[in-house]
């Protein structure tokens, strides 16, 4: 079973990183964006149950005061989404820390963990512009792969 | 067979070169022939691991081939002659001291004014100055991972600055993070290990506002590089619990494709732990991170030749948590005396770390024992991998179990992989198969000397005319907002500069969070914890200063004066906070372009000569350094080299941290002094750059006067006579005054006609000339007589105004008319806005 966990800021907590991306996209010449929201993403493959992933998302991945978590969320309609993941073979130190924390809270499984980022764009932006933003601002082909949808 | 032989026997030059190229060895034909001959004499061919080991050990990075090779240097001029006195007026230069100053005389066309063969440039300039100075307080210079000087009777202090340029261009975050991670390990690997107390960071980037259309294909935008680099240093330094306290940032279009990332670490080490000695029979212990394909071939790799999977290997990824645990346990093992030597795995990984430790004895290792991140590595890959967070120790066999327990206690992996021998050979095994067997003497001493030509063309420095204006308020405002002067707060505040609780003088200075200005140097008091433990405060109030100097703009005119200025700047920054100028040690970091171009190497030679001359004049020995050459990129057939850039970092001592001063103005009514002569030296200045003008007369250094005044000023500061002190650097007098005023939330009333100057100068020249060795000092009226007495007769100094209560800066020009009037708020806003990302 593959679980994808997204972490988003609760309402009322500003999304600074998203604002930066919006600002930089404008500098790049993509001016019609209304807002960008940013979410760190984690994927877990194998060895976990639904109750495990719930615990991991709540206890390890999110800050209960400022953030909420979404498990295997649907694609959001009307938004363009860019995701960035580390290439396999690239040392993922955050994933290693999560793996350790998973065992520390008493979960036995040893899932394959990966970390990434997602950016959701609202407003006037097309696929080609999103691709340009991804390449120029958000991912580095040396160590990362990306997707736009 | 995991290891393959590579046939060299009987091959011709072009075939040898093909092998070097195909395997990314970066060995020249001459070097390949030497290797061929060595194995011919042995009657066999080398293995892949042997060739890789030789290539790594002989690399520019490890051996500094260009700077330690033969350089044939010439200086030519259309018409010029070398003299001991630069302008006929300056009494500083003794006749027996051939300073590289040149007087221009007509009618001697095409004259070669100097020809010199250097057999080893580093040894004959930088090391030579240290040797001549022979300071008793130098404990370990140029032979270990860092330089070490005396701090007090118990402790020494170690300082090292490294560069991580190419990795940071490819992957800014990871490149910069592993840069800081690497230099921290240099400090952990000096002697038997020093405890890191502070980090420094200096960056050179392209213009962050660069038009996207002008960005070379395949490069990351300078702003993205800058942000990534800053986050990398931030995350690694902060997570290590080491404060980042000093640095500099420089912007120039020459760095668009080759950003420079200098990372430094300073640490404290008990004096008896400052040396290492491996004994035959000691065990080889690897501690810290696991080994993967990270960074194989470091910066020399060519990604197009590598397949999808190995493509990631060129990038090193840092893991500060692993390094932090390693640091804590290593220092514990050091204090128990469990090992006899330590060094870090940097470039070349195990091959260079094990090779260096075993250089005097010989060593035999078994690579199958090395813990791996994943399966499938070939023996030579294990041997060469630049995976981070690893160190190698020499452990006496009787301490085997004891030292293992120390590392186990924090879950730090520690694995014995071999032992040191007495056969003076490097023997590398993999599952009982010999992977490499090389004589240490050949490996470390066999590299043939290279020979390069260097040339410097002397040109006359001509004054650049600047238009006279009646008001320079707007110019000052623009200057304060210009890239090389504006606030670095956005960067500084991301760094933890307080952790460990011993940062006495901090990078941002002022009475509150809004009113802040740029400090000149950081001061660390290493005994804070000890003092608070005793409750009464320690009786040892000695502190350590860290400062730097850098200005590639001057190098575009003359690299000699760029280097001299950087040395003066680093030292004067230390003096500003109260360091003793007679006990300052320097580090050199040369980042240059392609050294095979003789004019580029020529400028480097001139910079090295200035290092020699100034080190002697200031009595400031170089104790460590590093160079990074070949900072060049190609667009089509055109090659662009970076502007030659020398970073000088200074480590100094303040005898009493309670007497240190900051740069912000303190109290209305106090007198404002300028120390040092203002000259018509707008060449390379930010003022000319703002007006898009180049050329001009570059600031010179008059070391004898400067050093005398620095000593006096330091005495005045340590006697408590000085309220605030700031140096004049980029932007000259005007910028320094404005920074002091808005930092202190005080005003200043200044009269330019009182500023000591060498010749008649216009107001713009007085305000913005960047003459070296100048300080602005605030002194209370009641201390002024004593202050002037301490500065002694003959100092080029004057009272130029007063601290005012109204929060604005007013400057009266030479004709008595007001030339600047502006509010602190306006100046501060302009200064803060540019890099408020």
Image (spheres, coloured by chain):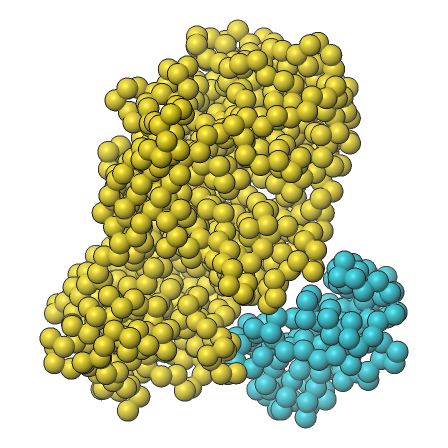
Chain colours: A cyan, B yellow
Residue A8 visible in the shown view: no
* Residue located 74% across and 42% down the image: B833
Residue B43 visible in the shown view: yes
Front-most of B811 and A30?
A30
**B174 vs B536: above or below:** below
* Residue located 29% across and 66% down the image: B28
* Horizontal and vertical percent position of residue B80: 37, 28
Q: In this view, does B28 lie to the left or right of A23?
A: left
Front-most of B90 and B106?
B106
* Residue located 28% across and 71% down the image: B53
Number of numbered labels in the structure image: 0
Quarter occupied by residue A51: bottom right
The quadrant of the picture occupied by the N terminus of chain B is bottom left
Quarter occupied by residue A44: bottom right
Front-most of B231 and A64?
B231
Quarter occupied by residue B48: bottom left
**B189 vs B131: above or below:** below
* Horizontal and vertical percent position of residue B615: 34, 33
* Horizontal and vertical percent position of residue B365: 25, 75
* Residue located 66% across and 82% down the image: A43
């Amino acid at each position: 079973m593959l679980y994808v966990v997204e972490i988003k800021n609760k309402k009322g907590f500003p999304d600074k990183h998203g604002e930066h991306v919006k600002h930089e996209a404008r500098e790049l010449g993509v001016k019609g964006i209304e807002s960008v929201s940013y979410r760190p993403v984690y994927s877990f493959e194998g060895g976990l149950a639904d109750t495990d992933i719930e615990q991991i998302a709540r206890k390890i991945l999110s800050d209960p005061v400022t953030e909420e978590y979404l498990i295997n969320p649907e694609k959001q309609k009307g938004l363009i989404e860019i995701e960035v993941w580390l290439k396999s073979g690239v040392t993922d130190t955050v994933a290693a820390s999560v793996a350790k924390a998973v065992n520390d809270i008493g979960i036995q499984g040893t899932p394959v963990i990966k970390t990434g980022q997602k950016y959701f764009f609202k407003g006037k932006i097309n696929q080609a512009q999103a691709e340009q933003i991804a390449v120029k601002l958000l991912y580095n082909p040396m160590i990362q792969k990306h997707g736009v949808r | 067979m995991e290891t393959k032989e590579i046939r060299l026997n009987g091959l011709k030059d072009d075939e040898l070169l093909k092998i070097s190229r195909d395997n990314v060895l970066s060995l020249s034909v001459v070097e390949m022939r030497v290797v061929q001959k060595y194995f011919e004499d042995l009657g066999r061919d080398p293995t892949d691991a042997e060739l890789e080991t030789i290539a790594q050990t002989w690399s520019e990075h490890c051996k500094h081939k260009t700077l330690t090779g033969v350089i044939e240097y010439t200086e030519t001029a259309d018409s010029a002659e070398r003299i001991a006195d630069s302008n006929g007026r300056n009494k500083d230069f003794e006749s027996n001291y051939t300073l590289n100053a040149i007087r221009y005389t007509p009618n001697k066309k095409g004259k070669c004014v100097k020809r010199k063969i250097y057999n080893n440039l580093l040894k004959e300039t930088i090391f030579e100055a240290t040797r001549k100075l022979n300071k008793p307080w130098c404990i370990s210079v140029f032979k270990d991972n860092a330089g070490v000087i005396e701090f007090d009777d118990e402790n020494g202090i170690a300082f090292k600055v490294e560069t991580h340029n190419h990795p940071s261009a490819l992957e800014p975050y990871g490149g910069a993070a592993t840069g800081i991670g690497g230099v921290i390990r240099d400090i952990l690997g000096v002697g038997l290990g020093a405890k890191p107390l502070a980090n420094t960071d200096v960056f050179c980037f392209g213009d962050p506002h660069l038009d996207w259309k002008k960005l070379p294909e395949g490069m990351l935008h300078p702003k993205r590089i800058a942000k990534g680099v800053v986050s990398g240093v931030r995350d690694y330094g902060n997570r290590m619990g080491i404060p980042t306290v000093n640095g500099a940032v420089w912007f120039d279009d020459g760095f668009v494709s080759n950003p420079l990332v200098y990372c430094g670490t300073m640490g404290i080490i008990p004096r008896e732990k400052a040396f290492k000695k491996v004994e035959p029979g000691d065990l080889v212990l690897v501690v810290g991170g696991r080994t993967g394909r990270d960074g194989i071939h470091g910066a020399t790799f060519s990604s197009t030749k590598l397949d999808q999977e190995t493509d990631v290997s060129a990038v090193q990824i840092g893991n500060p948590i692993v390094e932090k645990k390693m640091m804590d346990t290593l220092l514990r093992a050091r204090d128990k005396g469990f090992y006899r030597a330590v060094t870090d795995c940097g470039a070349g990984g195990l091959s260079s770390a094990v090779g260096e430790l075993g250089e005097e004895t010989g060593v035999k290792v078994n690579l199958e024992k090395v813990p791996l991140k994943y399966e499938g590595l070939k023996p030579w890959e294990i041997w060469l991998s630049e995976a981070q967070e690893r160190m190698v120790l020499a452990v006496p066999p009787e301490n085997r179990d004891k030292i293992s327990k120390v590392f186990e206690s924090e879950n730090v992996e520690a694995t014995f992989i071999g032992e040191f021998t007495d056969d003076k050979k490097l023997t590398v095994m993999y599952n009982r198969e010999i992977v490499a067997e090389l004589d240490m003497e050949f490996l470390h001493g066999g590299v043939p000397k290279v020979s390069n030509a260097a040339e410097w063309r002397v040109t006359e420095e001509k004054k650049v005319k600047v238009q006279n204006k009646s008001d320079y308020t707007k110019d000052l405002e623009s200057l304060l907002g210009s890239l090389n002067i504006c606030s670095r707060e956005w960067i500084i505040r991301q760094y933890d500069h307080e952790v460990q609780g011993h940062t006495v003088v901090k990078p941002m200075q002022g009475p509150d969070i809004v009113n802040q200005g740029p400090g000149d140097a950081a001061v660390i008091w290493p005994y804070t914890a000890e003092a608070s433990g005793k409750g009464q405060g320690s009786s040892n109030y000695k502190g350590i200063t860290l400062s730097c100097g850098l200005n590639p703009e001057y190098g575009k005119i003359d690299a000699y004066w760029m280097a001299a200025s950087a040395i003066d700047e680093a030292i004067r920054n230390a003096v500003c906070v109260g360091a003793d100028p007679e006990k300052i040690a320097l580090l050199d970091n040369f980042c240059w372009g392609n050294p095979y171009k003789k004019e580029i190497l020529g400028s480097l030679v001139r910079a090295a000569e200035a290092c020699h001359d100034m080190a002697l004049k200031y009595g400031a020995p170089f104790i460590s350094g590093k160079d990074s050459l070949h900072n060049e990129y190609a667009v089509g057939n055109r090659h662009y080299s970076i502007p030659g850039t020398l970073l000088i970092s200074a480590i100094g001592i303040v005898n009493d941290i309670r007497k240190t001063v900051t740069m912000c103005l303190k109290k209305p009514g106090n007198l404002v002094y300028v120390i040092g002569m203002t000259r018509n030296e707008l060449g390379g200045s930010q003022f000319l750059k703002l007006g898009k003008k180049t050329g001009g007369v570059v600031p010179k250094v008059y070391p004898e006067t400067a050093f005398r005044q620095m000593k006096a000023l330091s005495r005045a500061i340590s006697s408590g006579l000085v309220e605030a002190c700031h140096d004049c650097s980029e932007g000259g007098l005007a910028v320094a005054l404005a920074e002091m005023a808005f930092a202190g939330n005080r005003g200043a009333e200044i009269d330019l006609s009182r500023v000591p100057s060498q010749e008649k100068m216009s107001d713009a020249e007085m305000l913005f000339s960047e003459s070296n060795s100048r300080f602005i000092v605030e002194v209370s009226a009641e201390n002024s007589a004593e202050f002037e007495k301490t500065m002694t007769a003959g100092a080029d100094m004057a009272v130029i105004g007063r601290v005012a209560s109204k929060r604005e800066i007013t400057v009266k020009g030479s004709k008595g008319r007001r030339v600047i009037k502006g509010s602190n708020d306006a100046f501060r806003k302009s200064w803060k806005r540019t890099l408020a990302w």
